[in-house]
Each structure stands twice: as C-alpha cells, then as structure tokens.
C-alpha cells in the first residue's frame, strides 16, 4: 500500500453534522429542498450540491441527493430512476476528474448505520482531492473474483481478494459503456446484501473507481470491521464464495 500524507479531518465541523440514523427526531436536511444552497447540477429530483460540512482539508466535497424519497434506497429504485441516477453520478464524477486543480476524485455512497454515514436520506458523495491520489492505494487484485455473470461488456463478480473482507462484489465496465447493465448489477448486489445475504445485514457501501480505463463499483456489506484488519491489515476472504455465486445467480 502506498504511503501518502494523512488527510486532515476538521472535528469542529464534523461535530455539527446532523445524525439522522441515530437521532430520529432530527429533521432531514435533504428533504427540505427549498433550503438547499450551492447547487451545482440538477436532473429533476436528483441534485448535486456542495457539502455544507466540508470536514476534509484541501478538498472540494459535494453531495448527490439521489431522490426526494427519504425512505428509499438504490436497492429498490425503479429502473428508470436507477439508470438516471447512475448516469448523473458518473457524468459529474468524470467532469470533476477533468479539472486540473484536483489530483484525484472519488465517488462513493453509504447506506445503513454501519456504513459510516450520518444521514439516512439516499445520497452519494463526490470528493475532489487537491493533493491526494487514491489510485496509488489500488491494485488490480482488488477487483479479481469469481464471475457471477458477464454481459454487454460488464462483469459482475465476487472478490477472491477482498480489500477488507470477507465478501465484496465488483461490477466492472470498460470506460463509460453499458450504464444500464452496470446499474443493474450494482443494484442486484445491494438488494442481495440487504435481503438475501447469508448473514443479516442492514448496511453497505459502494465505492466507485476509475482504474486502468475501467469504471468499477465495489459493493461491500458492512458489519463491525474485523480487528485483524484494523490492527494489522490482515485481509480475509470467506470460504463459501462458490455457494454465494450460485445463490445470487438465481436472481439474474
């Protein structure tokens, strides 16, 4: 793993962030659309705007409010909205990547109380780093796996070398290819994690990468992180990957 400077997190700003996962009495800031400011782009009920709580130094932090339905999630979006959101997110991510003032740009989303997010309303984030290159921490092995299905130039697999463990799904597309197929596989992985995973799971992350000419979504079910990874960076993999491939293939 490459060594890069740590990104400074502004705790005084972080303490101000609303916590709608843990404090149900707090009103959702993304539902009050009349009060939204610093809007960058819109597509009907999908909105990209500057993050009101920029906790990371030397970055531009933005939020994509994915829908006006607070209790929804990507795993249950109607196909038309799913495709529109994924295209909107990828296009804006690529637009930021073209700007020379940023060394790298990431796109990711959280869902559930163990995902690291603070707001339950469906949203993603694009963060532009001035001095940090996330690609230096990425290796091709991060995306190799047992193929579940490959269709229309998009591969859907389950990692044999997960970054954290124990189970991770990858959706790999050559450039901006068949976005609908890419979105379908990504949605299937999230729905499977929340509804049919061998272990009860209520949280996941999706991490998007642009790596070696490919657009990749890594979908990670979230539990309490293994201490072996936190303390020693010991990576583990489940011993039932073949069984999981057969199980999720039934939903294709």
Image (cartoon, helix red, strand yellow):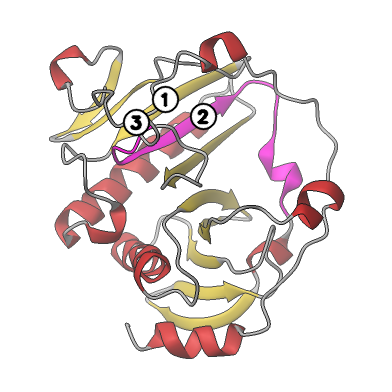
> Which is more foreground, mark 3 or mark 2?
3
The reply to whether the magenta stretch includes residue 133 is yes
Q: Are marks 1 and 3 in contact (CB under 8 Å)?
A: no
Image x and y of residue 249, in percent? 40, 86
Residue 20 got which mark?
3
Q: Secondary structure at mark 1?
A: strand
Q: CA distance from mark 2 to mark 1?
A: 6 Å
Is tag 1's residue or tag 3's residue first in the polypeptide sequence?
3
Residue 34 picture quarter = top left
Instruction: Give the residue at x 48% y 77%.
Output: 198
Whole-angstrom CA distance, mark 3 to mark 2, is: 22 Å
Front residue (pair 139, 168): 168
| Residue located 35% across and 29% down the image | 23
Say left or right for 225 vs 152.
Answer: right
Decide: is 178 above or below 176: below
Of pointers 2 and 1, the one earlier in the residue sequence? 1
Q: Secondary structure at mark 2?
A: strand
Residue behind mark 1: 62
The spot of residue 63 in percent (x, y) is 38, 29
Quadrant location, the C terminus: bottom left
Q: Are marks 2 and 1 in contact (CB under 8 Å)?
A: yes
Is residue 88 shown in magenta?
A: no
The residue at 51%/19% (across/down) is 60
Give left or right: position of 26 versus 158: left
Residue under numbered circle 2:
127
Residues rendered magenta in the picture: 119-138
Please report whichever mark, 3 or 2, sits nearer to the chain's N-terminal start. Answer: 3
Q: CA distance from mark 1 to mark 3?
A: 19 Å
Residue at x 45%, y 67% (from the top left corner): 200
Q: Quadrant of residue 65?
A: top left
> Considering depth in this image, is 96 or 124 the residue closer to the camera?
124
From this view, report whether residue 105 is shown above or below residue 26: below
């Amino acid at each position: 793993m490459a060594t890069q400077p740590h990104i400074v997190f502004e705790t005084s700003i972080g303490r101000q962030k609303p916590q709608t996962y843990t404090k149900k009495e707090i009103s959702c800031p993304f539902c009050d659309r009349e009060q939204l400011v610093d809007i960058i782009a819109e597509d009907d009920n999908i909105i990209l705007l500057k993050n009101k709580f920029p906790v990371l130094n030397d970055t531009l932090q933005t939020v994509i409010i994915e829908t006006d339905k607070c209790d929804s999630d990507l795993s249950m979006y109607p196909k038309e909205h799913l495709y529109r959101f994924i295209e909107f997110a990828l296009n804006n991510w690529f637009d930021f990547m073209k700007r020379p003032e940023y060394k790298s740009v990431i796109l990711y989303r959280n869902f559930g109380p163990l995902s690291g997010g603070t707001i339950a309303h469906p949203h993603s984030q694009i963060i532009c780093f001035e001095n940090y290159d996330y690609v230096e921490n990425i290796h091709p092995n991060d995306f190799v796996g047992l193929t579940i299905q490959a269709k229309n130039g998009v591969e859907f697999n389950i990692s044999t070398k997960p970054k954290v463990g124990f189970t991770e799904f990858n959706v790999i597309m050559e450039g901006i290819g068949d976005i609908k197929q890419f979105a379908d596989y990504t949605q299937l992985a999230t729905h499977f994690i929340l509804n049919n995973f061998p272990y009860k799971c209520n949280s996941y992350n999706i991490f998007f990468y642009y790596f070696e000419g490919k657009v990749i979504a890594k979908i990670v079910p979230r539990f309490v992180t293994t201490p072996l990874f936190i303390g020693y960076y010991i990576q583990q993999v489940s011993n039932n990957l073949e069984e999981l491939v057969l199980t999720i293939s039934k939903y294709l």
